[in-house]
Image (tube, grey):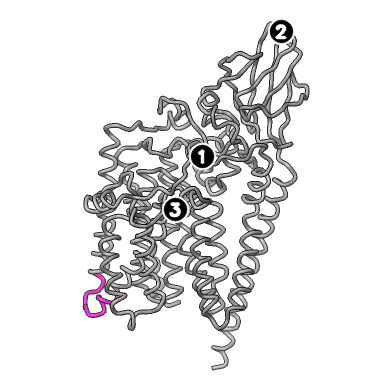
Amino acid sequence: MSRNKTFQNVFIILGYCLLAIICDFAFFKYRVIWGANDTQFHLGRINEWLHLNQGQFPYLSTHSLGGVGAQINVFYPSQLLYPLVVLIKVFQHPVASLYVYVALLSILTALLTDYATYSIFKNRRLSVLTASFYTFSFYRMLNFYHQFDLGQLIAMTFVPLAFSGFYKVLADDSGKWQLVVGMAGMIFSHVMLTFLLTLLLGIIFLVVFVLAADRWRILRDCLVAAVMTALLTAAFWLPMIVHMFQVPTGLQPTYWKVSTVISNSLSGTWKNILLNQMSTYHTPGTFLIVVGLTAAVYILWNYRQTPKVISISAILFLILFWMTTAAFPWHWFDHTFVTVIQFASRLCAFITLFASLIIAYGITVLLDGFRDRKFFTYFAIFVSCGMTLASVQSTIDSYLVNQPVITNKTFADFSAVKKYNALFDYFPQAAQPYLNDLSSNQAIINGKKHYLKGYGSANAINYTVQTNSRKNTIDLPCLNYGSHAYRITNNQKAITASFSRRGTFLVRTKTKKNHLRIAYVPTTTDRLAVWISAISWLVFILVIIYFRLHKNIKVNTQLDNL
């Protein structure tokens, strides 16, 4: 690599770092985070990690989200939260650590997006613009500042790599490692976004499979990538599936049920775009929509002179944007499995990428006729990021009026800030009618309702029950997922428990004073899944290193022969 190219790459990386720090301006200005829609849920996941020793995994939520033993982290991937947990434990400053983590995510997102784009187009300006527009976009910042959806924010880091890897697998028998790493990162981040991405890639695969001459090679490479991804991510999906089928009455993923896919109204969408504001109508933002629509029209009008992948990206951008609005006939899918999507606005993650790419391409083409191309490149990034920051400040201004704030002191007790019972996701369906009772720690002791607060420890919860009878029937406010991995004791002696009508643990005791403990002991499947992932990652990395070294040796040999 030449010295000029090295300097250029260092300059670009420093630019990404600077933009990531600027987008963290809220920490320097306010030093708090706000109680957004999903803050309580995700802070609860983080706090469960913080209560564990090194090497443990939070199977049960016993310190947050009502302390009812919900298996949140089994069904919602949290492996990529571990770096944040390490930062908090090392620096003992949760709020600052969270902002540092988000900044590091932004830098990683920019680098992966830049790499993914450059690996296809070999155009530095195009890759830098795409990475800047995508990483510091309205929708990514919305996921942090407005929604506080850490899972989706992390998942968006790997979307570009998954798409570029998939494209290269379809095009020229390369890029499998990009596809595998991208999909693995998605699976370890957000189930729903992974489902939507898999569905979208599956549709594209079927179209290409029918039209391509080398369809069997494509099928082979996709199957190899799928197997590799499955092995790398076994630590999450294998326990999740096993636990899901063990729940006696079936698993309910959310505390609220939907029979339709919720989409944005057309009036709400356009109002949001015109005002450049984050609200309940989630969009990719004013810059990406307005300029993206313009770029899409330009690209499709000149499709003969446009690379095929850019034209396809423009078409996907238009289709997916249509699907986020009420103009798309989502009502055709009412009361079907499609309602698992919940919100059509989740598609904004993909719209953001396609819009960033086609806008970057349009600007790159237009700048070919200018002498001072660097100035206009910086100006485009400035406008995009400036509009994002303006929308973030607008959101913060509204939060300063009517939203609670989370500081280092309240980070571990956010339920106290919210002033209402903490509802939870991923629970036995039998518990649905009793969620409020359970989240307020209501037990049923000998047929009567009592407040019973459990005391959480690592993957365990403890209760003390004193009665006047030697024979007691106690329905504890702790969710029962039907697994044999639970160890239930009373006064340090093992006892049995049954599945109650509330989806909780029903125990019978023969003592007046009862010290009950429900602990989760990792199963063989839990431990085996971790080993499968660990060994697979080791082998995967070694294989990539081998092929990289082999490729470099081959190139050097060819140069020596010239």
Circle 1 is placed at which residue position? 254
Which of the two residues, 45 or 311, is positioned nearer the viewer here? 311
Q: Position of residue 62 (x, y in %)?
A: 58, 30
Q: Is residue 374 magenta?
A: yes
Q: Is residue 178 above or below residue 146?
A: below
Give whichever of discs 2 and 1 has the lower sequence position: 1
Three-letter code, disc 1: Thr
Circle 3 is placed at which residue position? 105
Circle 2 is placed at which residue position? 469
Marks 2/3: CA–CA distance = 56 Å
Q: Position of residue 25 (x, y in %)?
A: 31, 46
Crowding at dot 1, Cα within 10 Å, few <14 / some 14-19 / many 20+, comes out as: some
Q: Position of residue 502 (x, y in %)?
A: 61, 27
For the point 26% across and 32% down, which residue is it?
A: 401
Query: In the structure shown, which secondary structural element does the residue marked by tag 1 occupy?
Result: loop
Examine the rendering and report whether any part of residue 49 can be seen.
yes
* Front disc: 2 or 3: 2
Give whichever of discs 1 and 3 has the lower sequence position: 3
Give whichever of discs 2 and 3 has the lower sequence position: 3
Crowding at dot 2, Cα within 10 Å, few <14 / some 14-19 / many 20+, comes out as: few
Looking at the rendering, the stretch of residues picked out in magenta corresponds to 365-375
Name the image quarter holding residue 370.
bottom left
Which of the two residues, 67 or 85, is positioned nearer the viewer here? 67
Three-letter code, disc 2: Ser
